[in-house]
Amino acid sequence: MKALTYIEIGRFDVTEKAKPVISAPTDAVVRVTLSSICSSDLHIKHGSVPRAVPGITVGHEMVGIVESVGEAVTKMKSGDRVAVNVETF
């Protein structure tokens, strides 16, 4: 899959990454249909977020379609449209 990736201070690039898979019962895999860049991502680009290391994917505010869910997920299913705001590295 394609992802906007932090490469180094001052540089993002579109890279190819492995498609995520369910690894925990509470996981959901969402196919992103639209994402935006916010000021948090710009802070990463300028090197102001020490825990954001090169290689992370940016654009954590997104909408998409659920592709798969773990066995403990009960409030959504494959095919559901969702909005996501995730701030993890």
Image (tube, rainbow, N blue to C red):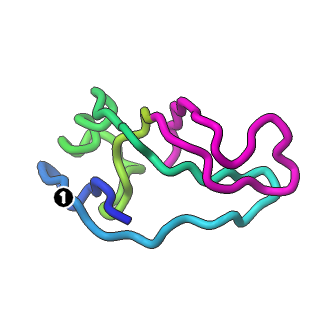
Residue 61 in which image quadrant: top left
Residue 32: x, y in percent? 44, 46
87 in the magenta segment:
yes
Image point (30%, 61%), residue name:
54
Residue 6 in which image quadrant: bottom left
88 in the magenta segment:
yes
Stretch of the chain drawn in magenta: 63-89
**14 or 64: nearer the viewer:** 64
Residue 74 in which image quadrant: top right
Q: Is residue 62 left or right of residue 79?
A: left
Q: Secondary structure at mark 1?
A: strand
Q: Is residue 28 left or right of residue 83?
A: right
The three-letter amino acid code for the residue at tag 1 is Asp
Q: Is residue 83 above or below residue 31?
A: above
Q: Is residue 63 left or right of residue 50?
A: right
Image point (61%, 46%), residue name:
66
Q: Is residue 30 left or right of residue 80?
A: left
Residue 84: x, y in percent? 54, 33
Marker count (numbered): 1
* The furthest residue to the front: 79
Q: Which residue is mark 1?
A: 13
User: Alpha-carbon neighbours of circle 1 within 10 Å: few (<14), some, or many (≥20)?
Assistant: some
**61 or 30: nearer the viewer:** 30
Residue 78: x, y in percent? 69, 49
Q: Is residue 67 above or below residue 55?
A: above
* The furthest residue to the left: 10
Image point (80%, 34%), residue name:
75
Image point (38%, 65%), residue name:
1
Q: Is residue 21 above or below residue 10?
A: below
